[in-house]
Amino acid sequence: MPEAQYKYGRFGEPRECLKTKSSSPMQTEEDKAKAAANPVVWFAMSATFGRELKAKSYLEENEVECFVPLQYRMAVDRSGRKERKLLPAVSNLLFAHTTKDRIQELKKDHPYLQYHTCPMEGRNMPIIVPDDDMQRFISVCETHDERLLYLSPDEVHLSAGSRVRIVGSKFDGVEGVFMRVEGKRRKHVVVCIQGVAAVAVATLEDCYLQPIER
């Protein structure tokens, strides 16, 4: 089954689908079974020692869609001058949209590229991010709003908040959990990739929150 690259519009709507491999006009039942057993999914990955952008370039050169959350920060260039640059928001983190067979093949020659894992049935299994969660996360991160807060899983307690949808502002349509964030006076809307990372949106003056029934 051909891999596909999705380009997301505002808050998760697929804008276009770019096929990265040519597809045959007909698929046999065997082809369909193989594709079902090895689907294209979002893997949460780690690139050690701050090599997330290097890993992203490598994977994209091999026709794998990737996402690295970026945030504007002040950086010092080689001449010692400070400049505002888009830099990785979460150390070592990237996401790859491909099949298990393909990412295994690409990892062989790049040992710094590893899975984020979670314990399951006595084994550490790669974390696969549901498409809807990934789309929400990408859409918020791609605003590059300087007020976004990136949180670790240990900092997020979703059971303490309520599910809401933002109506209005640049975050119109975002769904998340309205909750308190440690060290902040105001509540935030938190969009979470379970076991990996979360991004918190401060509520804005030009929007309101719509409760979502469970």
Image (cartoon, helix red, strand yellow):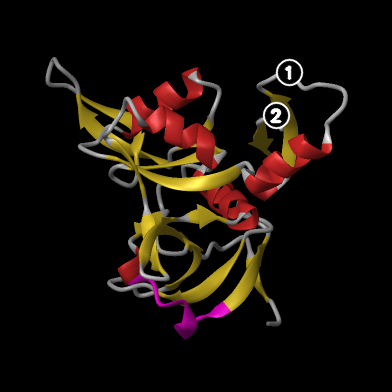
Picture residue at 66% right of the left edge, 22% below the top: 20
Q: Could you say which is closer to the camera, residue 209 or residue 106? A: 106
For the N terminus, give its image quadrant.
top right
Q: Residue at x 37, y 72 (%)?
A: 181
Q: Residues within 10 Å of mark 2 (few under 14, many from 20)?
A: some
- Left or right? Give the position of 199 relative to 109: right
For this orientation, the residue located farthest to the right is 26
Q: Position of residue 50 (x, y in %)?
A: 24, 36
Q: Which mark is residue 70?
A: none
Dot 1 corresponds to which residue?
22
Are discs 2 and 1 less than 8 Å apart at CB? yes
Q: Is residue 211 left or right of residue 56?
A: right
**Residue 70 placed where, x, y %?**
40, 39
Name the residue type under label 2: Pro
Please determine whether, in this image, residue 52 is positioned above or below residue 180: above
- For the residue labelled by badge 1, is the local secondary structure a helix, a strand or a loop? loop
Say if the magenta span includes residue 156: yes
Quarter the C terminus occupies: bottom right
- The label shown at residue 2 is 2
Which of the two discs, 2 and 1, labels the residue nearer the N terminus? 2
**Magenta-drawn segment:** 155-162
Residue at x-position 73% and y-position 18%: 22
